[in-house]
Amino acid sequence: MRKPTHPLHMRSPVPQGRRHTLPASEFRSLSPEDAISVFEIEREAFISVSGECPLHLDEVRHFLTLCPELSLGWFEEGRLVAFIIGSLWDQERLSLDALTLHRPHGSTVHVHVLAVHRTFRQQGKGSILMWRYLQYLRCLPYVRRAVLMCEDFLVPFYQRSGFHVLGPSEITVGPLTFTEMFYPVRGHAFMRRNSGC
């Protein structure tokens, strides 16, 4: 009888380097504990461009306490690299109240802010995160649509994600004016039924 060349119970040696306990890439809702990381990314992203932050730190904490399920963070090895924060709204168009209020019985998600950490920009992360967020909204039976307001130069970015222009926003911040856009979540009911939600 011929002897096997390599004993069956032996395996090739596995390098015993440092083991990663954190997932390489994770998407999850944010919590109030994430507020400082969120605000640091947001402040750098917006102040460098427009001089204004959509949400101040206390407002970030406010929304992450009231409606954390309407936020989504992208973490790589435990580090926040991009995020979206939303809240519920109950009117067709956004008004000044929409900037600070969460209307729990609303059927519209107001997307307050999408921001990507500066070292991860120009990699398509904003588009991927928005796509995942909209897929997630399809699984929430009470959500009919998503709305946001953005500066004109961002309109093409959001159009590529499926948003449509509603027109000029009635909200202004200092000299800044905005375009209001919407995404018809309820129009994708068939996809929602077949998406494993």
Image (cartoon, helix red, strand yellow):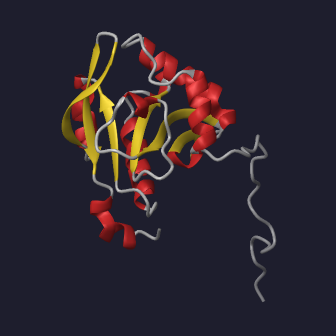
Residue at 42% x, 31% y is 97
- 81 vs 106: above or below: above
Q: Please tell me which residue is depicted at 75% across the width and 44% down the height of the picture.
A: 19
Number of labels in the image equals 0
Q: Which of these two is toward me, 16 or 146?
A: 146
Q: Position of residue 30 (x, y in %)?
A: 60, 41
Q: Quadrant of residue 80?
A: top right
Q: Residue at x 40, y 36 (%)?
A: 126
Which residue occupies the foreground of this view, 148 or 43?
A: 148
Does residue 144 sit above or below 1 in this rendering?
A: above
Q: Is residue 134 visible?
A: yes
Residue 94: name its quadrant.
top left
Q: Does residue 125 appear anywhere in the picture? A: no
Q: Is residue 125 above or below residue 4?
A: above
> Is residue 175 toward the left or the right of residue 70 in the image?
left
Taking depth in this image into account, of 36 and 116 the one nearest to the observer is: 36
Give the residue displayed 29% in from the left and 44% down from the top: 92
Query: Quick check: 65 left or right of 181?
Result: right
Look at the image and tell me in which quarter the N terminus lies: bottom right
Residue 174 relative to residue 1: left or right: left
- Percent x, y of residue 106: 43, 51
Q: Is residue 16 left or right of residue 145?
A: right
- In the rendered image, residue 74, in percent from the top left (x then y), is placed at 53, 41
Give above or below for 103 relative to 140: above
Percent across and percent down for residue 73 are 54, 40
